[in-house]
Amino acid sequence: MDLAQQTAERRPACLARLAEGTAPFHEPRRDDCPWCGSHRLRVRVRTPDLVQGKPGHFTLARCADCAHTFQNPGLSPEGLEFYRLGSGRQDLGHRDFWRQDLCHGVGGAAAAILTRAWTSRRRQLAGVRALSRFGEPESWLDVGTGRARFPAAAKELLPYTAFDGLDGDRGLAEAVRRGRIEEAHRGRLTDLAGRLAGRYDVLSMIHYLQRRPDPRAELRAARTVLRPGGHLLIEAPDPQSRSARLLGKWWASYRQPRHPHFVPLANLCRELDELGFTVVGVDRRSPHVPSDLTTACALLLNRLLPDPDVPWHPRPPAAPLLRLRRAAWWAAIPLLALAQAADVLLAPLLTRTGFGNAYRVIARKEPEG
């Protein structure tokens, strides 16, 4: 069955769900910060769904006291299902979902230019090298692993480490079949932590915390899973990046409505300290993903040239309209290529001047008592 047929089959159910508008997709707006409880909240970003173009608008609020940025109002369970799993790619892990969802949303083959930066092996290995300074671990759990591309890259430097993966999607089966991980844990870390208690020397969360409804609960679960002396490796978008302020809603990491929380580096380090970790490494340069300009251009083009054949539109588009959009996207490839070249060439300067878009934290779990 081709994509047009799948879209046609999904259209009646999607339109029925939208009959009452998007209000059921949102929880009540909160008037306090979920991190520190402050009532000094400011609107940081208002944006539609710039990737898939689904109906609705979303707001990110920033706490004036602790700088935590969060989705307000957040998505209800029905909203989570509609916006996060409504693309028909439920068999992919979250990291793979981002790449596949973005490619589909912004013009298929043209988007391959910009997604290349998100799969950089050099950036993946930088995190592994930073962790390996503390010794070669016997066991490593990659949380939110998707199809386990990160463990596959890490094995190049740590061939004797046993890598396992945890995610909530069926893409794990492929990761095991390809030998990227040895054991797959399907589910949520917060649900499986008790069963996995004290099992791993390293736990990695690569661009994971911003997707979770309760980052603090994820950190507590990570502490349960790690052995005493084990290490937690976190990479996450940096909400204090100058790129975030400059690009606004076009900043790739905002990716509304699928990222509900953005934890500032200082907040994360304090929380880890309170949980009994010792922060042994912080890096705001090498985790930078050189794709801000490219993705901003792609999202803008996607806003101007949206996919007309989607199940939340009442009628399928005429064939000439589809051909016109495809031609326009191919014509935009030089612009995307130029933006990507600028991203790569400017990366050394950007990461030295506060424009790095991500940070890395390595923390050691100290023995109790």
Image (cartoon, rainbow, N blue to C red):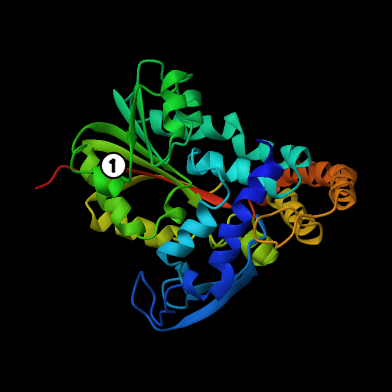
Q: Is residue 336 among the parts visible in the rendering?
A: yes
Q: Which residue is mark 1?
A: 364
Residue 145 coordinates in the image, percent (x, y): 44, 36
Residue 119 coordinates in the image, percent (x, y) = 60, 35
Q: Which of 133/312 is in front? A: 312
Q: Is residue 72 visible?
A: no
Q: Amino acid at mark 1?
A: Arg
Furthest toward the top, the residue is 160
The image quadrant where one finds the N terminus is top right
**Residue 216 is drawn in which quadrant?**
bottom left
Q: Position of residue 207 (x, y in %)?
A: 48, 47
| Side of 148 relative to 186 (left or right) | right
Q: Secondary structure at mark 1?
A: strand
**Residue 217 shown left or right of residue 298 in the figure:** left
* Location of residue 313 by image quarter: bottom right
Q: Residue at x 41, y 20 (%)?
A: 158
- In the picture shown, does residue 280 fall above or below 184? below
Within-10-Å neighbours for mark 1: few <14, some 14–19, many 20+: many
| Residue shown at the point (77%, 37%) measured from the top left | 109
Q: Position of residue 19 (x, y in %)?
A: 57, 72
Question: Residue drawn at (59%, 30%), measured in percent from left and top?
Answer: 122
13 vs 46: above or below = above
Instruction: Name above or below for residue 344 compared with residue 57.
Output: above
